[in-house]
Image (cartoon, rainbow, N blue to C red):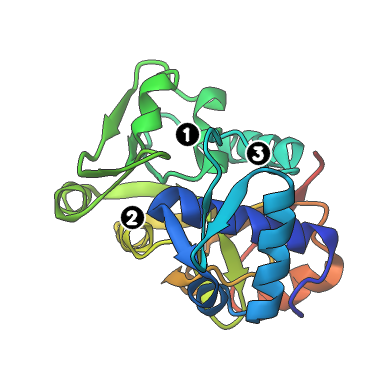
Amino acid sequence: MAERRSRGFVEQRRQTIVEILREEGRASVSDLADRLGISPLTIRRDLTALEEAGVICRRYGEALLAEGTSPQSAASPFEAEKEAIARAGARLVGDDELLFINTSSTALALVPHIAAQGVTVVTNSVLAQGLPIPRSGMILVTGGEIRPPRGVLSGEFALANIRSVAATTCFVGCAGISLTAGITSTTQQEATVNSLMVERADRMVLLADSSKLGIGAGFSYAPLDRVTLLITDTGATDEDVEILREAGIHEIRRVEP
């Protein structure tokens, strides 16, 4: 699978830059280039586009979010795809299952669509407080260090609680899917939590829209052959699907937005 050069690739890369800045506050051009595996010139072009859109500003050789930027700013153009993927994931959940769900917006969007009863959800997102509780089930939050503004819970406290759980299924999203780097996150803290969730679950269901294909986002948390099922959208081509299967992903489903 060649690295995607489509509009979706560029938009996802810029969204990844915004996510990094939300997590860490600021970043240099060289740091972003190293983490995304692209040239500083390309990063500068992305930063110029984001600055012109009013999302970020640049000071003293670094980029940071513009004052007043909300979590909804520079929203993903793949919201319909994400919703369709989340619904498809929810249909896989059976009664009395114990699930890991990470902080991915697509993975969290699965929870309101769970029709099964007695489901327990374990998540490291503080946004879980706004989710509906599955019928006769519960939502457990790992605790841990809060990394604003997305409310990611990480650190040894979160990891210790995850180690005490043996889940049936791990529903996770990602920042990118790369043939060389595998499944990736934008931060080391998230990658560590995601990796342990995958390790402590019987199966891994990856929920990722097609813009994530061909992107390495800095920190690997699972190899491709650990993915039991990838649910993506119809933006993924037949060639993409065949290459990902050959790379080790066991099953791939494409859903219409």
Where residue 226 appears, as percent x and y from the top left, is: 47, 69
Q: Residue furthest front?
A: 60
Where residue 252 appears, as percent x and y from the top left, is: 68, 60
Q: Where the C terminus falls, by quadrant?
A: top right
Between circles 3 and 1, the one closer to the viewer is: 3
Sequence order check, earlier mark of 3 and 1:
3
Please, what is the three-letter code of the amino acid marked with disc 2?
Answer: Met
Q: Secondary structure at mark 1?
A: loop
Between circles 3 and 2, the one closer to the viewer is: 2
Sequence order check, earlier mark of 3 and 2:
3
Seen in the image, is 138 located left or right of residue 208?
A: left
Please, what is the three-letter code of the amino acid marked with disc 1?
Answer: Gly
How far apart are labels 3 and 1 at the CA level? 13 Å
Residue that badge 2 annotates = 197
Please, what is the three-letter code of the amino acid marked with disc 3?
Answer: Ala
* Residue at 67 percent of width and 52 percent of height: 51
Residue that badge 3 annotates = 88
* Residue at 74 percent of width and 77 percent of height: 3
Where residue 174 appears, as percent x and y from the top left, is: 53, 57
Where residue 99 appears, as percent x and y from the top left, is: 38, 41
**Is 233 above or below relative to 115?**
below
* Residue at 56 percent of width and 43 percent of height: 66
Residue that badge 1 annotates = 94
User: Relative to the observer, which residue lies in front, 81 or 15?
Assistant: 15
- Residues tagged 3 and 2 counted as in contact (Cβ below 8 A): no
Mark 1 surroundings within 10 Å by alpha-carbon count, few (fewer than 14), some (14 through 19), many (20 or more):
some
**Is 79 above or below relative to 204?**
above
Q: Secondary structure at mark 2?
A: helix
Res. 248 visible in picture: yes
Mark 3 surroundings within 10 Å by alpha-carbon count, few (fewer than 14), some (14 through 19), many (20 or more):
some
Sequence order check, earlier mark of 2 and 1:
1
